[in-house]
Amino acid sequence: MRAITQTLTDTVSAAFEKCGYDPSLGTVTVSDRMDLCQFQCNGAFAAAKLYHKAPFIVAGEVAAVLADEPMFAKAEVVKPGFLNLTLRDESLTALMRDIADDENLGVPQAEKPETIIIDYGGPNVAKPLHIGHLRSAIIGESIKRLARATGRKVYGDIHLGDWGLQIGLVITELSRRHPDWPCFEPDFPEGGEVPELNVDLLNEVYPAASKRSKEDPEYKAAAQTATFDLQNGRPGYMALWREIMRVSVADLKSNYGRLGVDFDLWYGESNADRYEPKLLDILTSKNLLVESEGAKVVEVAAEDDKAPMPPVIIKKSDNSSIYATTDLSTLIQRQEDFDPDRIWYVVDKRQSLHFTQVFRCARKAGLVRDDCELEFLGFGTMNGSDGHAYKTRDGGVMRLSDLLDAAERAAAEKLSASDFTEGADLSGTARKVGVAAIKFGDLINHRGKDYVFDMDKFLSFEGKTGTYLLYTVTRINSILRRAGSDENAPVAAGRIYTDAERELMLAILLSGEAFVKAFDEKAPNYICESAYDLAAAFSRFYHDNHILSETDGDKRSAWLGLCALTKRLLVKHLDVLGIEPVESM
Ligand code: ARG
């Protein structure tokens, strides 16, 4: 299905044309005064300038043509030249039916096929997953689902930080603790065995090593050498690295699993390694690589830069590769494997400069198709109530698993204090409610903004919260159940009985617009707003209309059909947000 404003724009454009005006003047938008009309067109003002006529006259001519359109109840001119449009109830209910019958529930689909790679998550192997990686996971997952829901082919790539200094640090620390392990011997055989590691050990080893390297220059140098040797394939280190990867990836999978986040590709910086020679070839053959203080760099400054733009370092003076090198090499891999139309990076906005450099270098070197969109989708910080980056009580970095545990506990408390349905699955529900609260509390903010993490607020049954949305779904479930119906209750086309019913239909109709806008702006907060509008419209509808006690059979079944459609659409919104509904609560 097309977005309703698209359909209306076609009709109104044709009317402009019929009156002898440019059809592009007929753009229709959602009304900002719903009390006056549902849609509006302000094209008469631009027409007035172009054709030297009063806007009121132009709008009047167009309205006269639209008067013959059966879809409108009203197409009227309001001074000084607004065109106010309202659909006939029959048009609105027919659209409800179309949406209910549409496999995408009225969400407009991309016109041309597109392949998108979304680089998100980006955790660092061997370091515990902490809440700094939470936003990337939540936002990236949602943008991935949004792109899919609007008909794109999408690959989510976790892009593990699995090839850097943190591994060198872990190797160094383990070699100091266990100098006797054969993997530390220079002649360790290819394919040799290493002792089994576990996640608790890694969680303890990395911080210890990181702390020590800050205090002890010799230790730090050893860790850098270990990193370099690893990257050059030293067999004992490679074997240890594989064991670290095995343990870390299993732990990451379980944490992301709890959060309902999953990736199509578990590639990492290490996978980029084999594309590096090609990168160097391309950069050399295009004369882009220059020496600077012993390092090999690419200049990416542009004349009109307002701020200094440092060159991208490709090889440091010790010949090691860095962050930009792997990101550039990864672009070669992505182009070869997927020939994508867009590549999006969901990363902390403080990395903006890095991505500007990488994208400029990639363009200069032609690493991806010229028309492949490279975009950095930076996000802000999750703060505590003190306005600073969220920390544990003792000021440390909170582990993601601890945060999820705390959310679950808080949700369970909240549910037990409310009239939670007896006999229902409290712990399973609390798990979903906790995750929903965290995700919605994050996604309701535009991704670029910082926000304050406030579990109490996120768990509120009222207002713009995940909890309220889940609750609304359970309310609809209960109505349908009590009426002996289900989410497939048919939607009736024809009459509308009450204003609240009409407003709910309008909220349903406008959902499709929200999906388009959210995709265009890569901003899931519009899905949150649309979900809330839908739930709030439903609450008013439910309050005003006594569905279960209604004795008029036609009315009752029309309302049940509307309940069912609302539920399906709300669940679709939630799905895009990565939130699982609960049966009852
Ligand atoms: N591992 C990085 C970090 O923790 C994030 C990776 C983001 N993705 C990328 N392609 N650079 O900062």
Image (tube, rainbow, N blue to C red):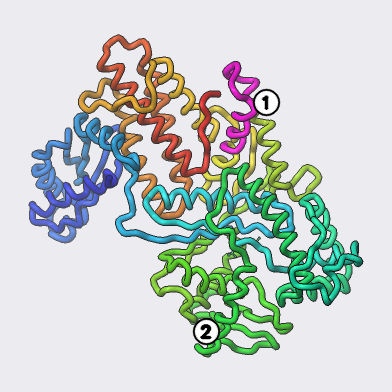
> On the image, numbered disc 2 is attached to which residue?
282
Looking at this view, is 110 or 15 the one in front?
Answer: 110
The magenta stretch spans residue 427: yes
| Ligand 1 rendered quadrant | bottom right
User: Label 1 to label 2, Cα distance in Å?
Assistant: 59 Å
Look at mark 1 in the image and give the residue it sits on. 413
In the depicted structure, whether residue 289 falls above or below residue 32: below
Q: Which of marks 1 and 2 is nearer the N terminus?
A: 2
Which residue appears at 70% of the width and 37% of the height? 405
Q: Is the magenta stretch mostly helix, strand or loop?
A: helix
Q: Which of 273 and 165 lies nearest the eye of the viewer?
A: 273
Are the residues tagged 1 and 2 within 8 Å (C-beta)?
A: no
Q: Where is residue 536 in the image (x, y as percent from the top left)?
A: 43, 30
Above or below, comparing residue 245 to residue 255 in the picture: below
Magenta residues, as a range?
415-436
Q: Residue at x 55, y 58 (%)?
A: 265
Considering the numbered disc 2 on the image, is that residue within a helix, a strand or a loop?
Answer: helix
Q: What residue type is labelled 1?
A: Glu
The kind of residue on which mark 2 rests is: Ile
Q: Can residue 308 be seen in this view?
A: no
- Name the residue at 85% across, 63% down: 174
State the image coordinates of residue 167 (x, y, percent, origin top left): 75, 65
Q: What element carries label 1?
A: helix
Where is residue 127 drawn, in percent x and y? 74, 57
Q: The C terminus lies in which quarter of the figure?
A: top right
Vertical placement of residue 268 versus 506, above or below: below
- Answer whether residue 224 is magenta in the image: no
Q: Is residue 479 visible?
A: yes
